Amino acid sequence: MKTARPLPNKFQDRPFTVGEAGRAGITSKRLRHRSLTSLGRGIRAGCPTAELALSVRVRPFIEVNERCAASHFTAAELLNLPRRRRKGRSDMFDIIRPEGAAHLNRPHVIVHRMKLYDDEVTTVDGIPVTTPERTWLDLAEMLSVDELVVAGDSCVRIPRPEFEDRDQPLCTLADLQRMIDRHKGKRGLRKAKEAIRLIRVGADSPQETMLRLAIVRAGLPEPEVNVPILSDDGVRHHEPDLSYKQYRIGIEYEGEHHGDELQIERDIARSERYAALGWTEVRISKRHLLNDGKAAVAKVRSALVQAGWRRGS
């Protein structure tokens, strides 16, 4: 077979649909050339796709089918929501297709046929994706209650504009509740109802959420989330990840980045501020969250008892 004519630049580094290729003047003969890989009916690729961004990889699978949107795990990844990694093949995409639409059976695609309202679809990088609140409800089919709380905390958290490109939450608690109320009888609804009671605004990481859940389930008072410390003269100081104002206890989860030299210096300065303010600092790391967070709970309980807390008080 002869060497194929090079594809137009815009098709060389991404998968594409046969339809858009035809509109760009690529012949059907060229589309049959062995230099192209078929990713299913109507989709071709002239390059390896595994390392491409998810939005680039999933786009043609949505464009080739009308009335579809990325959903479930695929939507969660596009929206940067915390989620469990899918078991099995990494080249599978979740696509939602409204009830009543024609049956769809394609390689690389997990099709979810269910009720879908127009206001439950947004766009990410130009492709249709279920909204954060709808994605959260769909994840209830697949995640545990705790994992769903983690995803919900991420949805409703207030971004920090100095570190992110947005200043509004992905959605609100009211938006999540609206999804629950709208989709009666949906799979996972019981878990969603349980999870929404545990979602709080303020958590900056999945670990902070898991730590809070472990503390509460151990029967300890529920801590506040990222509330600033106010000194006796009314000056606003830093915000502990979790805290008990009444007992002057701040709880800090320290991820892997806390091993950085500059971060170590900042952490030492933070500990000095705690001491100066008359607060107790409880530092938690990844190892404390193992075994359902028992070690973390023990540290927090000890600090509370030393500060005068008693069960039932």
Image (spheres, grey):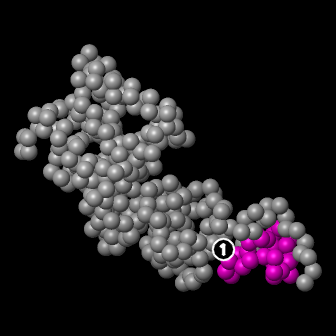
Q: Is residue 54 left or right of residue 254?
A: right
Find numbered disc 1 in the image and state the secondary structure of the residue it sits on.
loop
Q: At 13% across and 38% down in the image, what residue appears?
A: 305
x and y percent of residue 162 in the render? Answer: 51, 34
Which sits in the foreground, 94 or 246?
246
Q: Is residue 268 above or below residue 296?
A: above
Question: Circle 1 is placed at which residue position?
Answer: 64
Q: Is residue 28 above or below residue 312?
A: below
The outermost residue toward the top is: 233
Q: Is residue 143 left or right of residue 80?
A: left
x and y percent of residue 28 in the render? Answer: 83, 80
Say if the magenta span includes residue 25.
yes
Residue 57, picture quadrant: bottom right
Residue 129, picture quadrant: bottom right
Q: At 52% across and 71% down in the image, what residue appears?
A: 94
- Write down the region rendered in magenta: 20-46
Q: Quadrant of the C terminus?
A: top left
Q: Quadrant of the N terminus?
A: bottom right
Say if the magenta span includes residue 225.
no
Q: Would residue 201 be seen by someone viewing this image from the given angle?
A: no
Q: Would residue 312 be seen by someone viewing this image from the given angle?
A: yes
Total marks shown come to 1
Q: Is residue 39 above or below residue 54?
A: below
Q: At 29% across and 26% down in the image, what residue appears?
A: 274
Q: Is residue 85 above or below residue 1?
A: above
Under mark 1, the amino acid is: Val
Which sits in the foreground, 130 or 272?
272
